[in-house]
Image: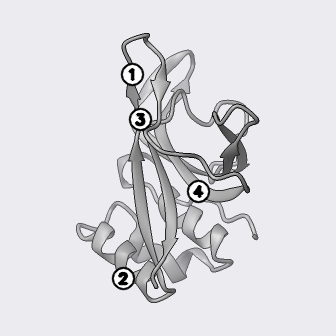
Amino acid sequence: MTPVYQTRFGKDGNCWAACLATIFDLTLDDVDQCSCNNSNWWEETDKFLSERGLYSIEIESYINEKGNRVYPMVWPLKPTICCLLGPRQVNNKINNIDHIVVAKTYADKDGYPVFDLIHDPLGDKSTPLDHIKFIILFGKII
């Protein structure tokens, strides 16, 4: 994986395209149609992935009755590449614009998820996300 950094920021940013470019070893121009400033960015993402025999799986987190953030899925035992989406914390305040990063996820010895940051398209590894709202995995079309 070659790290690709976003070139647009804010609500018209291209962090998602930069994540896809990083994962698939492409240039930002190769996946720019998947950036959120395009009105049909999710359809373009589906097309981009299906051309590679893949589809996306979105897992939404929620807060359980104990106040813990949980993810309703069984975690893979072997490390799997994924993307994590959520708000960033900027100057001790949660930003209202979501950001996405590339990570590796797997289950720890007790079956709980572990997330290892691989790439932040902003280049800032200090506080990429305040919390994870969505996990995006890639499944193979068979």
For the residues labelled 2 and 4, the Cα–Cα distance comes to 18 Å
| Local SS, label 3 | loop
Q: Amino acid at mark 3?
A: Ser
The residue that mark 3 highlights is: 61
Q: Are marks 2 and 4 in contact (CB under 8 Å)?
A: no
Task: Determine which of the numbered discs, if any, sits on residue 76 in the image.
Answer: none
Mark 4 or mark 1, earlier in chain: 1
The residue that mark 4 highlights is: 82
The residue that mark 2 highlights is: 47
The residue that mark 1 highlights is: 63
Front residue (pair 20, 139)? 139
Q: Give the class, few, some or many, for how many residues have Cα within 10 Å of label 1's Cα (few <14, many ≥20).
A: few
For the residues labelled 1 and 2, the Cα–Cα distance comes to 32 Å
For the residues labelled 3 and 4, the Cα–Cα distance comes to 14 Å
Q: Amino acid at mark 1?
A: Ile
| Local SS, label 1 | strand
Report x, y in % for residue 117.
71, 45
Q: Quadrant of residue 43?
A: bottom left
| Local SS, label 2 | helix
Q: Quadrant of residue 113?
A: top right
